[in-house]
Image (cartoon, grey):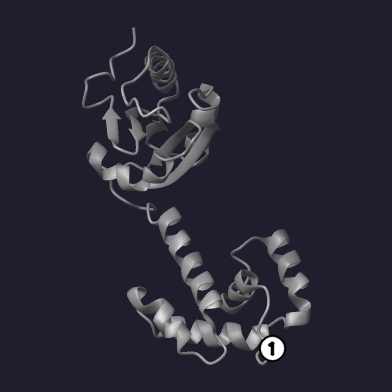
Amino acid sequence: MCKENNKPKIRELVLERGLDFPIDEELIMLILGTGSKNMPIDIMAKKIVEALDSSNRDDIVETLLKVNGIGTGKALAVAAALELGKRRYCHLGAHISHPDDIIPYLKNYAICQKEHFVAVTLNGGHDIIQIHVVSVGTVNRTLIHPREVFGEAIRENAAALILCHNHPSGRIQPSEEDVETTKLLLEASQIIGIPILDHIIIDKNGYFSFLEHNLLFETE
């Protein structure tokens, strides 16, 4: 394991090889950055991993605070990193059979101040492969091109797509531009052979499903 004075080496190796490369203790070292006056970062990281292995999800902070040398700041930093990872990647493999099923995995976009257009790739069983941000626009507009929407789906060998974007204005009904964009993408989906199952508009108060409102019309 790399010692504290070798932290740059860990960072360089992660940048070169990716976040799959470091072991758990080294990930903790990257999160915390430094140890304490009485505990080097490598020893602290080892103790934290041991504590995590013996803790439940609801008592992570309490368990970490029982470790000598771990203060509130470092305990919260580790717990926050775990929570962020859970929020960002809990969607992987989730089964989608109704628009309601996907909303929990997209709600973080509902409060964004700029419009985000998102493509959710699904496998043949309609389980989520990945959620991709296709475009980020201004307060009330984003520009979409079919190649950006379907590029990741093709690379991932996806069987279907669900589209989603937020309305920062708070008006959840689709605009004429939303309808026209959906028409264009439906036409592209027929050519490419990856069906669009729904287009969902979200804001902090709810969602609008094109599927539920019979707006996933057949293109001519």
Give the residue at x 46% y 39%: 112
Q: Is residue 126 in view from this perspective?
A: no
What residue type is disc 1 on? Lys
Q: Where does residue 116 sit, x and y in percent of width and height?
A: 48, 33
The residue beneath circle 1 is 37
Q: Residue 164 location, x and y as percent?
A: 39, 32
- The answer, for residue 80, to whether it is visible in the render is yes
Image location of residue 154, percent across then percent down: 49, 35
Element under disc 1: loop
Q: Residue at x 42, y 40 (%)?
A: 111
Towards the viewer: 24 or 31:
31
Give the class, few, some or many, for how many residues have Cα within 10 Å of label 1's Cα (few <14, many ≥20): few
Q: Is 101 placed above or below 185 here?
A: below
Above/below status of 190 relative to 132: above
Q: Quadrant of residue 118?
A: top left
Taking depth in this image into account, of 20 and 158 the one nearest to the observer is 20
Quadrant (top left, top right, bottom left, bottom right) of the C terminus: top left
Q: Please count the marks in the image.
A: 1
User: If the image is split into quadrants, where does the N terminus sit?
Assistant: bottom right
Question: Residue 147 at what x, y percent from top left?
Answer: 54, 25
Q: Can you say whether 81 is above or below 206 in the image?
A: below
Q: Where is residue 89, by image quadrant? A: bottom left
